[in-house]
Image (tube, rainbow, N blue to C red):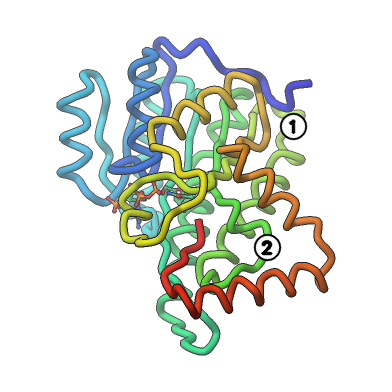
Amino acid sequence: MSLNPPISNWPGQVVWLIGASSGIGEATAHALHAAGARVFVSARNAASLERFVRDHPGAVALPLDATDPAAVKAAAQTVQQAGALAVVMYCAGYYKPQRADSFDLPEMLKHQQINYLGALYMLDAMLPHLLAQGSGHISIVSSVAGYRGLPKGLAYGPTKAALINLAETLYVDLRASGVGVSLINPGFVATPATAQNDFEMPALITASQAADEILAGWRKGEFEIHFPKRFTRWMKTLRVLPYTAFFALTSRLVKNEAAAPTRKTP
Ligand SMILES: NC(=O)c1ccc[n+]([C@@H]2O[C@H](COP(=O)([O-])OP(=O)(O)OC[C@H]3O[C@@H](n4cnc5c(N)ncnc54)[C@H](OP(=O)(O)O)[C@@H]3O)[C@@H](O)[C@H]2O)c1
């Protein structure tokens, strides 16, 4: 049973992706443009967005900092003038490893601002429009790192857990309104964000494969779009482990990391 109205007929559909100057967001924008959608792309790097627009005729660049609510609102108004919105995807993200023994408040807050508050600014700007429209779809990119507390994830993990809870609650609240909600939980995807990793990332996929998974999830009307399954299913088993078993496993991971200190949270 589909939890959302399936979306597959893209020609002419208005889509807005925030966090589309690189990686998963850019690859998804590319796939949507290839499918015929009218693509609006946002992020801070205006030069990357302009390059995207040059390579994708008809696409529109709306550079912004997702932590600036006025900028998000102004861009939302431009998107809204383009007509009925099919999908808004919040993909902006930031990750720096952090542990409790090197607690860094500014970094904690930076993760909150980009990963979580930016999503709230998008909702503040888009929800009234979508509710008035009685259709459309909100997609929130979280991570399997939000399932449970993981080593080095002190700053990143809680923001992704918050996004999972936010998307679930949005789905519950919006179900009867005609507005769909999906939660995107990637495993490891090769992007600028993961390029700094110097260990072998399990089940690593390309950004273009991630985009294919996302479009397939929308087509099937899924609520949670998680991929690649060979990795995310394993992460889901962690989610249901009792704390004794879970902490035994994570302390083994920490010991392994002490031997190979570069492991990173997806
Ligand atoms: N790659 C993975 O393995 C993986 C796994 C799980 C989840 N994710 C999530 O997937 C999303 C995309 O990440 P990615 O891997 O594709 O990394 P990425 O290539 O670094 O993309 C991050 C995007 O977020 C944008 N962004 C960052 N701060 C922003 C801000 N303040 N305002 C507006 N845009 C901002 C970046 O653009 P600008 O720098 O131009 O602003 C960029 O377009 C993130 O939410 C990440 O947490 C990734």
Residue at disc 2, CB closer than 8 Å to ligand 1: no
Callout 1 environment at 10 Å: few (<14), some (14 to 19), or many (20+)?
Answer: some
Q: Is residue 61 left or right of residue 258?
A: left
Q: Secondary structure at mark 1?
A: helix
**11 versus 1 height, above or below:** above
Residue behind mark 2 = 148
Q: Residue at horizontal 16%, vertical 34%?
A: 51
Residue 226, position in %: x, y?
A: 60, 39
Amino acid type, mark 2: Arg
**174 versus 13 height, above or below:** below
Q: Is residue 108 left or right of residue 43?
A: right
Q: Residue at horizontal 51%, vertical 74%?
A: 257
Q: Nearer the viewer, residue 85 or 153?
A: 153
Q: Secondary structure at mark 2?
A: loop
Residue at disc 1, CB closer than 8 Å to ligand 1: no
Residue 43, position in %: x, y?
A: 31, 47
> Rounded to the nearest whole Å, what is the CA distance between mark 2 and mark 1?
26 Å
Residue behind mark 1 = 175
Q: Which callout, 2 or 1, points to the residue nearer the camera?
A: 2
Q: Nearer the viewer, residue 36 or 239?
A: 239
Q: Nearer the viewer, residue 50 or 234?
A: 234
Question: Are dots 2 and 1 in contact, CB under 8 Å?
Answer: no
Residue 52, position in %: x, y?
A: 21, 32
Q: Residue at horizontal 44%, vertical 75%?
A: 261
What's the mark number on residue 204? none
The quarter holding residue 12 reads top left
Q: Is residue 94 left or right of residue 257?
A: left
Q: Nearer the viewer, residue 65 or 34?
A: 34
